[in-house]
Structure formats: structure tokens, C-alpha cells
């Protein structure tokens, strides 16, 4: 039997044995008592041993040719390898970053690279702008056709960005399918939110009915003459289905959330079949109240905001009731006693940021009456309030969009993203012309702003809304879809048309490269919704 690690080839072992046989051939060899080789002539004996040695050498050479070659490190490096892509690699929305040849440049390809190039072109054609968002690193890349501003690529603070593999349900130590090395499944937010129709995300919306919020108190069971106001809360569910049909959807529902079928699934949304929940309140200013704008989870409380009174309410959505928590006044908190016209709110770190529409308050002649709506209230976990003047920040966003006074932007949807380390902004209205109450209703925006933490770097993304685009629609609220690394947005658009006494709302989903994943979907009844939250 061949020894492992002896370090000698078959040829060397035979070469050592040959002189031993030659020496033994010179001595008489007894094979038995009845027969002696010494009787043979010594020359014949030597010839016989020589022939045996030649036969052994030939057999050794034959065995050597049959044994597998032992490659040296140099030979191993030069040996050809066959690489195969993992199954469904082209269908995965999250792939390692690639290097592309410059547009319009073609080079000679080797036979191996030719096939790889064809696969790459196929992947790009099938994937579209999905490749524009790299999940393999923390660098955010946006398509130049849909991006304007101060550069198309910037790297967020890496200490504030979670590993992209965690967003995909893959542990840091490697592994596939969200499994740790010991076989235990890693729990992620997407594992329990929207992975299939049987495991949807729960979503709630809140309405701002403007002057329509006032109701007849006696008709609603209240006291005659009492001022009473209402708002609507509407629920829905977001889930995903694989593109390959219902049969595959049923199989995907039996798999984990990181299965390939769910990874490449389409978004679907269904509104609750129940009637909307009607919320009542009596707090008002000048006969108007309960005009609720925005929903935010802060300190484990769901908050909503009255843009008429400046009241911040705790919203107990299961019990369908509102409890006042804070009263915010506009401006710096000292110059005015008017309630803050709250239009957006978001959580950054341990603080709640509450803002207004971010524009000078003017009359129809363009005269500036005050600048209170540039101020932002910042509330900590203990309820302490400080204020910051964001006029310079709002001006930076106008500059990124090429807007100069008397042009303007109206904001109702601003969120901070810890995962992107960016402010994400969806302007409601954008105009290069002076403000006009009626014309303003047809100046809806289709832009997305990605802003660095200090707003010194702002990228503008054009959202690919399917044609025809209704200029009356503008963004009133949005939230990041859980489990997408804050790269997919569920947004609410609202529409107001005073000439037709019309209010409508629409839901849409798109990613931060501007690719629409769910086109505008109308709400089940004609009301204006200005707040959304995952609950």
C-alpha cells in the first residue's frame, strides 16, 4: 500500500531497489533443499535478474502515468476553473456591484468574457433601474438621467449605515437564506412584515378634511350648538407576491421571508374592507380643528398633528381616540401665539422633529407677511422643546431644484433615515412663479431629494410616474417600507381642486432611484389623507 506523505515517487523507489537486486544477484540464493540456483551459470542468473529489473521499471513507469498529477502552486494557479452563477442570480434585486464599460466604448472580448458580457447585458435588460441601488456596499448610486444636483454619488457615514446583508436577512458571518451557521434563522423586520399575503404589513392613514372636518354636533349625538370636528382613520395591508403567479405565491408563503420568490416579489396593497374609523374632537381655533397632518411613532406612542391648532395628539388607533399631548406655536415659540401649522414630522436619534411647509407666508400680491413657517420644533424624550430656524436649509433645497424667489417649494413630507444617513424629502408643490391660491393646486411635484445630514449635499431624483401625470397630485406623507433598508418608499399623494370642490388621495410605492413599484392607487373614498404609518 502507498504511504501518504512519503515524499518519493514510484520512479525513485524502483531506482533504490535496482542496486539492491543487482548486489543480491551476485550471491547464491537457496530456494529449497531439493533445488539450488547455484548450479546455474552465474551469467545466466545475472541476465535473469536484469530482465526482471527491466520489467519492474516498465510497470513502474506505467503506474506513474495512471496516477493523478500533483499540481504545484504555480500549476494550480494556472489550471482552468469553471465558474457558475448561483441559481436565479439574474433575478435577484440585490447583487454585488459591477464595473461597466463606458457608454459607446466596445472592446475585444475573449471567448470566456463574451459569454459573461452577454449575461451581464441580459441582467441589465431584465433588472432595469434595480441595479442602480447597490446593496453590496454603503455607497448610494443614482441614475444620472433621473438625478440632478451636486453630484450623483456620495458615500454616507459608514458608522451609521447597517450592513446591507442585515437588510437582506443574511447574518454578518455569511450564510444564505437568513440562516446562521448553527441553522437558526435570523429575525429581521421583513421576516414578519409583508413577506406574503398571509404576513402583511399593517398600515394606517389619517385624514385632513380642511373645512369639511366640522360636523353637526346634534346629528352626531352631541349637544346642540357644540362645536365638533372629525377626521378619518383608514387601515390597509401591504404584502408581496412573486412575479411567477399564484401557484408560486402559495409556495413562497410556505418559505421564509428571505426566499428567492419573495425577494423578487411585486408589492400589492389592499385597503381594509371595513368602513373608515371616524375620530371626533372639539379643540379648535376660529371654528376649525381636527385637520390632522402626519403620523409618527415616537417613544412607543403613535402621534398625529393638527395643522390648524398646533396640537400634537396621542393616537390610540385601536381604541379610535385621540388625547392631546403638546401644543406647539409657530415661529421661534415666543414671537407668535398662533398654533403651529404642522405639515411634517420625523424622528432623528432621540428627538422628534416637527416642521411646517417651509415657505414665506405671503398674500396673493406676493407681499411677505411673516417667516414663522421656516422654524422647526425639536422635542426630546422628556418633552423638552427647542426650536431651530431652517430658512437656510429650505433655501438649499430650493437651490438644488433651481428655484429662486418668488418661486417656492411647499413641504409636507420630510423624513430622516438612519440606514441611509440622509434626509429624504418629497416636496408637495414646486413652482418658479409667485404663489397663487388657485394656481398652486396644479403645481404638484414629482421630485425626490436625498440630502446629507447638514443639507450641504442634495441630490434630486425624478420619480418615473406613469403618464399622464396629473399636476394636481402632490406628496403629503410617506414612510420607508420595513425591511428594505429605507430604499423603498410608501407614499401618499393628495389632490385638491377648489373649482370642483374635490379632494382625493392616492397611494404609490417607489424606490429611491425613482423606479415606481406600485402606480398611483386611489383611496376607496374621496378625502384628503396627509399621514401614514406602519403599525
Image (cartoon, rainbow, N blue to C red):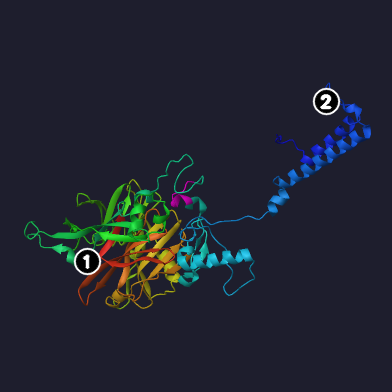
Q: Locate residue 134, reporting x and y percent.
A: 49, 59
The one of 516 and 198 positioned closer to us in this rendering = 198
Looking at the rendering, the stretch of residues picked out in magenta corresponds to 165-171
Residue displayed at 7% across by 61% down: 219
Callout 1 secondary element: loop
Residue placed under numbered mark 2 in the picture: 31
Distance between mark 1 and mark 2 Cα atoms: 114 Å
- 191 is higher (above) or lower (below) than 332: above
Mark toward the start of the polypeptide (1 vs 2) = 2
Would residue 167 be counted in the magenta stretch? yes
Q: Which mark is residue 403?
A: none
Q: From where the camera sits, is residue 333 visible? A: no
Q: In x, y percent, where is residue 404?
A: 42, 75
Q: Residue at x 31, y 71 (%)?
A: 473
- Answer yes or no: is residue 245 visible: yes
Q: Residue at x 64, y 70 (%)?
A: 108
Q: Residue furthest front?
A: 34
Residue 12 falls in image quadrant: top right
Instruction: Give neighbour class at mark 1: few <14, some 14-19, many 20+ (Cα, 10 Å).
Output: many
User: Is residue 216 left or right of 440 when viewed as pictured?
Assistant: left
Measuring from the top left, give residue 203's x and y in whole percent: 29, 56
Q: Is residue 348 magenta?
A: no
Image x and y of residue 389, in percent: 39, 61
Contact (Cβ within 8 Å) of mark 1 with mark 2:
no
> Which residue position holds label 1?
527
Q: Residues within 10 Å of mark 2 (few under 14, many from 20)?
A: few
| Front one among 22 and 401 | 22
Amino acid at each position: 500500500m502507498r504511504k501518504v506523505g512519503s515524499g518519493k515517487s514510484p520512479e525513485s523507489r524502483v531506482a533504490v531497489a535496482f542496486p539492491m537486486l543487482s548486489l543480491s544477484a551476485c550471491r547464491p540464493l537457496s530456494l529449497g533443499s531439493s533445488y539450488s540456483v547455484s548450479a546455474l551459470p552465474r551469467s545466466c542468473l545475472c541476465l535473469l535478474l536484469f530482465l526482471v529489473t527491466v520489467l519492474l521499471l516498465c510497470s513502474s513507469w506505467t503506474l506513474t502515468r495512471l496516477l493523478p498529477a500533483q499540481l504545484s502552486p504555480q500549476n494550480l494557479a494556472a489550471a482552468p476553473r469553471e465558474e457558475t452563477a448561483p441559481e436565479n442570480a439574474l433575478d435577484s434585486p440585490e447583487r454585488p456591484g459591477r464595473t461597466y464599460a463606458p457608454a459607446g466604448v466596445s472592446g475585444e472580448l475573449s471567448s470566456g468574457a463574451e459569454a459573461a458580457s452577454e449575461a451581464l447585458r441580459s441582467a441589465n435588460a431584465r433588472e432595469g433601474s434595480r441595479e442602480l441601488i447597490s446593496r453590496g456596499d454603503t455607497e448610494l448610486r443614482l441614475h444620472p438621467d433621473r438625478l440632478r444636483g451636486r453630484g450623483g454619488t456620495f458615500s454616507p457615514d459608514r458608522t451609521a449605515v447597517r450592513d446591507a446583508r442585515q437588510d437582506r436577512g443574511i447574518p454578518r458571518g455569511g450564510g444564505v437564506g437568513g440562516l446562521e451557521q448553527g441553522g437558526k434563522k435570523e429575525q429581521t423586520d421583513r421576516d414578519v412584515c409583508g413577506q406574503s399575503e398571509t404576513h402583511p404589513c399593517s398600515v394606517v392613514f389619517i385624514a385632513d378634511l380642511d373645512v369639511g372636518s366640522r360636523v353637526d354636533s346634534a346629528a352626531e349625538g352631541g349637544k346642540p350648538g357644540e362645536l365638533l370636528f372629525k377626521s378619518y382613520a383608514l387601515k390597509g395591508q401591504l404584502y408581496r407576491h412573486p412575479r411567477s403567479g399564484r401557484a408560486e405565491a402559495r409556495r413562497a408563503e410556505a418559505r421564509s421571508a428571505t426566499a428567492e420568490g419573495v425577494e423578487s416579489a411585486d408589492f400589492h396593497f389592499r385597503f381594509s374592507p371595513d368602513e373608515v374609523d371616524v375620530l371626533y374632537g372639539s379643540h379648535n381655533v376660529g371654528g376649525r380643528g381636527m385637520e390632522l397632518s402626519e403620523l409618527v411613532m415616537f417613544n412607543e406612542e403613535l402621534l398625529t398633528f393638527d395643522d390648524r391648532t398646533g396640537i400634537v395628539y396621542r393616537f390610540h388607533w385601536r381604541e379610535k381616540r385621540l388625547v392631546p399631548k403638546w401644543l406647539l406655536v409657530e415661529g421661534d415659540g415666543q414671537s407668535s401665539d398662533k398654533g403651529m401649522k404642522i405639515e411634517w414630522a420625523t424622528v432623528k436619534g432621540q428627538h422628534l422633529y416637527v416642521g411646517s411647509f417651509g415657505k414665506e407666508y405671503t398674500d396673493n400680491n406676493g407681499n411677505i407677511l411673516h417667516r414663522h413657517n421656516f422654524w422647526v420644533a425639536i422635542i426630546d424624550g422628556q418633552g423638552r422643546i427647542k426650536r431651530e430656524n431652517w430658512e437656510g436649509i429650505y433655501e438649499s433645497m430650493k437651490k438644488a431644484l433651481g428655484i429662486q424667489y418668488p418661486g417656492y417649494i411647499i413641504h409636507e413630507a420630510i423624513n430622516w433615515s438612519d440606514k441611509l444617513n440622509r434626509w429624504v424629502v418629497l416636496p408637495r408643490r414646486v413652482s418658479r412663479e409667485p404663489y397663487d391660491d388657485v394656481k398652486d393646486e396644479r403645481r404638484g411635484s414629482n421630485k425626490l431629494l436625498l440630502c446629507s445630514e447638514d443639507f450641504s449635499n442634495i441630490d434630486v431624483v425624478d420619480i418615473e410616474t406613469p403618464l399622464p401625470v396629473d399636476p394636481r397630485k402632490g406628496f403629503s406623507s410617506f414612510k420607508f417600507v420595513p425591511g428594505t433598508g429605507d430604499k423603498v418608499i410608501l407614499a401618499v399623494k393628495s389632490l385638491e381642486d377648489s373649482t370642483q370642490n374635490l379632494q382625493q388621495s392616492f397611494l404609490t410605492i417607489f424606490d429611491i432611484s425613482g423606479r415606481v413599484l406600485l402606480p398611483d392607487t386611489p383611496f376607496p373614498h374621496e378625502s384628503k389623507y396627509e399621514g401614514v404609518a406602519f403599525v
